[in-house]
Amino acid sequence: MNTTNSRRAVAIALAATAALASSQAGAHTLYDNGDTVIDFDFEAAVGVFNSSKSYAQVLRTEDDSPTWQEGYAKYGLSAATGLDGAGSVYGAFNLLSSATRGDGDAGGFSTGKEEDTQVEDAYIGWVSGDLVPWLGEDGIDLSFGRQSFTIGDGFLINGDSLNFGEGFQPLADAGIAPNGLSRGGAYWLAARKAFDKTAILRLGGDSGFHLDGFWLHSDNKAQAEMELAGANLEYRDATYGTVGVTYLKGLDVDEESAEFLGYQHRDGQKTLAFRANGSLGVENLFVSTEYVDQDNGDDYAGGGDDHAWYGEAGWTFADMPWSPKLTYRFSSFSGGFDPLFFGFNRGYGTWFQGEVAANYAGPFNSDTDVHHVGLALAPSETVELGALFFQFDNAGDGFLDGNEVDLYAQWIVNEHLVISPLVGFYTPDKSAAEGGTQIGDDDTNVYSQVIAIVNF
């Protein structure tokens, strides 16, 4: 399986609904004596999906209209305790249960028969409190264990959130694919996000210089169980924004799954990224950009020396009714660019561009240029309405050229519930018979989904 095809299997993280829900997220306190706190954590999500078209990504061959359901629940304990002026210790242990039912997703990565319960979070950490005043409150944060990790807005790393289902199992039974690619369902919801093993050192706070040093080891065969290390240096300013530089070095992969996915280059891969985002001190302005240079080695079939970049600008018309926000972004990815553990944490379309294209049809942040225009409206403090347009220009062969329009709503019902319906219209230039991925024809696919998130 080549690298381009493997990227077609990238599962989306929980989109802008998760960003909205995060402001409401919390936990139920079981014990609090002023120094030690123990919380019960709970988060759940369910989704109902329909696609009028299917995509030839795994083993789907029929021109059908799949309907499927996904769900997960994460539950467990988190705690923190002070150390008498020597900072505090914190940690968490959470299980996660997930499932997919129905026909399986439109790309065939899940079959509708997935379910599993596994440990999701299991980590411990220490923060410094006031021990090092020049680094600020909790200016040293050292943690170890099974946990998620994000850099910036998730252009390269936003947890280990690729969640294959059982779609590859017939290939595994035939000895073509490795066993263990499935993570138990909830492909779109990207239920599992934690790296299996981590060591993370954070220095600095939310203003001034901030440094992350990290070692991450994935147990996700869909990511070839990649091991990597790196550093991330940022300067954060509340008025103007953030600038940062990140360096990543691939250390190891699982040979069997790397060969199947075309990820052998990740062992020794070097990635250097520069980024900036913020308002530049101008009210209602948002700008963001990132440039990535990636060395995949001279033997890499994709070319070895690759890159990706984007530029984005948005303006909020705060004095108009519903405070419309208009955004334009151009992103470009070279033919062999490896987007790694990308995801997003600031809304639909970042960094999964187009609900159909990003999840089922392609392209997938490699060998493509993408024009994106977005409009968001805020009728109230708890409701957002949006429209997203994407134009995909597949640089290599044009087989994955197409356009997509997504219309969505996000409603914070109360502090524990968020609901988000979406309808998408995806039109490819070519069908699967013509070298694309959409089975049957190149007509417009009408796609719909409704997501509900519960947390406390």
Image: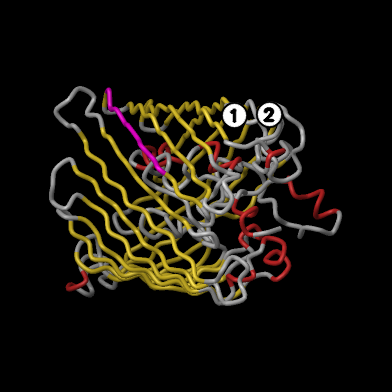
CB within 8 Å, label 2 to label 1: yes
Verify whether residue 166 appears in magenta: no
- Element at label 1: strand
**Residue at numbered disc 2:** 66
> In screen coordinates, is 295 left or right of 256?
left
> In screen coordinates, is 419 left or right of 65?
left
- Quadrant the N terminus occupies: bottom right
Q: Residue at x 28, y 66 (%)?
A: 234
Front-lying residue, 376 or 307: 307
Residue 407 location (% of width, % of height) = 43, 27
Q: Residues within 10 Å of mark 1 (few under 14, many from 20)?
A: many
Quarter residue 85 falls in:
bottom left
> In screen coordinates, is 60 left or right of 19?
right
Quarter residue 316 falls in:
top left
**Residue at numbered disc 1:** 49
Does residue 139 lie above or below 311 as drawn?
below
Range of residues picked out in magenta: 371-379
